[in-house]
Image (cartoon, rainbow, N blue to C red):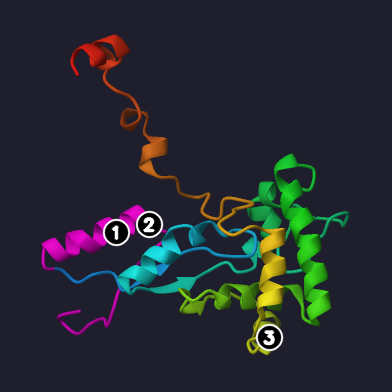
């Protein structure tokens, strides 16, 4: 930034605690701070509402959300009782996300049906509802729609003017409560605190509860 090569920089899919840590470390060291966070956010993955979005608001950071269609789950192609080709398109990349036979996907399919009903009541498509929902949060600066074809781009842009009223947002909250994830939107990454056993275990010599009580 000081050299004039970039105007701003940010992070992607950081948990709230790491955003805060990066903010303070930059201040202590006299460095530029992250200006944006880029997290996944959708009707089916609302987990960032609990801490990431409020944290970014407090720190004055922009938020550029991605995957508003929940990896394609909100595209309208995947419906309960319909045929799902797990060897083509998005399912071929991660079939566990779409397989209707997996119990873990039952809540997603059930929510999609109710969200599709809401979209029909509003006179819009399910993808339009999904993008409008992500844009409605006051902490969200922009929604990355990620179309793969010109037809998808034209369709999503046609719904850009859709604004959801409080009644519609209340119905969404009833279907998927605020802060709830019906799937792990960032399942390609897990925090070291969960993946590294050494961070979750005391040394063998210091594991006895009696010794810790005796030592205070």
Which residue, given by chain and number where applicable, does mark 3 sit on? 159
Front position in the image: 25 or 180: 180
Identity of the residue drawn at 70% across and 84% down: 155
Magenta residues?
A: 1-30
Question: Does 12 lie within the magenta span?
Answer: yes
Identity of the residue drawn at 53% across and 56% down: 47
- In x, y percent, where is residue 143? 53, 76
Residue at the left extreme? 29
Which residue, given by chain and number where applicable, does mark 2 sit on? 16
Q: Residues within 10 Å of mark 1 (few under 14, many from 20)?
A: some
Q: Is residue 118 left or right of residue 52?
A: right
Residue 83 disc label = none
Identity of the residue drawn at 56% across and 55% down: 185
Front position in the image: 149 or 60: 60
Q: Secondary structure at mark 1?
A: helix
C-alpha span from label 3 to label 2 = 31 Å
Question: Does 210 lie within the magenta span?
Answer: no
Q: Is residue 184 left or right of residue 56?
A: right
Identity of the residue drawn at 71% across and 60% down: 174
Asked if the residues shown at circle 1 and circle 3 are in contact, with their CB atoms under 8 angstroms apart, the answer is no
Q: Secondary structure at mark 2?
A: helix
Which residue, given by chain and number where applicable, does mark 1 sit on? 20
Q: Is residue 183 above or below residue 142?
A: above
Q: Nearer the viewer, mark 3 or mark 2?
A: 2
Quadrant showing the N terminus: bottom left
- In x, y percent, where is residue 124? 77, 81
Q: Is residue 173 above or below residue 92?
A: below
* Residue 110 in sight from this viewpoint: yes
Asked if the residues shown at circle 2 and circle 1 are in contact, with their CB atoms under 8 angstroms apart, the answer is yes
């Amino acid at each position: 930034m000081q050299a004039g090569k970039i105007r701003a920089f940010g992070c992607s899919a950081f948990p709230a605690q790491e955003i805060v840590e990066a903010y303070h470390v930059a201040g202590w060291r006299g460095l530029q701070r992250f200006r944006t966070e880029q997290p996944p956010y959708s009707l089916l993955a609302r987990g960032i509402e609990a801490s990431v979005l409020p944290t970014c608001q407090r720190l004055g950071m922009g938020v550029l959300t991605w995957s508003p269609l929940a990896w394609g789950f909100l595209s309208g192609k995947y419906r309960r009782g319909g045929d799902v080709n797990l060897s083509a398109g998005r399912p071929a990349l991660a079939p566990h996300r779409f397989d209707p036979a997996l119990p873990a996907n039952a809540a997603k399919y059930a929510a999609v049906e109710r969200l599709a009903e809401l979209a029909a009541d509003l006179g819009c498509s399910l993808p339009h509802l999904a993008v409008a929902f992500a844009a409605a949060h006051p902490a969200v600066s922009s929604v990355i729609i990620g179309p793969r074809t010109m037809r998808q781009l034209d369709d999503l842009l046609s719904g850009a003017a859709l604004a959801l009223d409080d009644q519609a947002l209340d119905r969404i909250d009833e279907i998927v409560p605020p802060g709830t994830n019906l799937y792990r939107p960032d399942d390609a990454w897990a925090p070291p605190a969960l993946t590294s056993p050494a961070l979750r275990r005391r040394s063998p010599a210091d594991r006895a509860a009696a010794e810790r009580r005796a030592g205070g």
